[in-house]
Image (tube, rainbow, N blue to C red):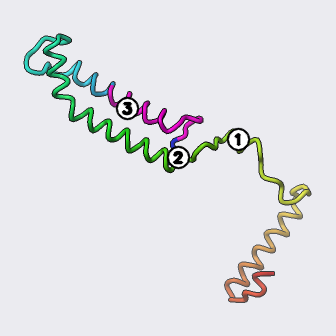
Amino acid sequence: MLLHIGGTSPAGVAAVIAVIFLLIFAMSFAFGPVPEGERRFTAPWFRAWLRASTPRLAIAAAFASVIFVGSALWGGGGSSSAANCENPLAPLSGGAITDARLVTAIGALNDMTSAAQSGDTERMRT
């Protein structure tokens, strides 16, 4: 559950999700049927809308909380991809990769495969 998008914190991700859910519910009620026959955007209409939307908003809050907790626990912590790029892995060898080296490596892999298939563990290790 890696949710560190561009260095965003878990709280930022949860806030974005909560805002998206809030906007979806607001749009569904603002442009949907008018609750209890009231005119739109009046105080009684808003109270009826809030009463009708409370369960949905609670579900959205619970979902955003689960995403936040999951992101905080398993989201990768404080490391960012930029920090990893600044410290690349050291090369395995200093030589250039040539056709001859690739052919040698493929031959060694084929030898290892045949040793594994024949059950020769000592030859496989070497």
For the C terminus, the quadrant is bottom right
Q: Is residue 75 left or right of residue 109?
A: left
Residue at image x 27%, y 27%?
Answer: 25
Residue 18 forms part of the magenta stretch = yes
The x and y percentages for residue 100 are 89, 64
Read off the residue under disc 2: 75
The x and y percentages for residue 46 are 19, 17
Q: Nearer the viewer, residue 10 or 121?
A: 10
Residue at image x 83%, y 55%?
Answer: 91
Read off the residue under disc 1: 83
Residue 18, numbered circle: 3
Q: Nearer the viewer, residue 125 or 46?
A: 46
First in sequence, mark 3 or 2: give its number: 3
Q: Is residue 28 left or right of residue 21?
A: left
Up/down of 41 relative to 57, above or below: above
First in sequence, mark 2 or 1: give its number: 2
Residue 51 forms part of the magenta stretch = no
Q: Quadrant of residue 97?
A: bottom right
Residue at image x 43%, y 41%?
Answer: 68
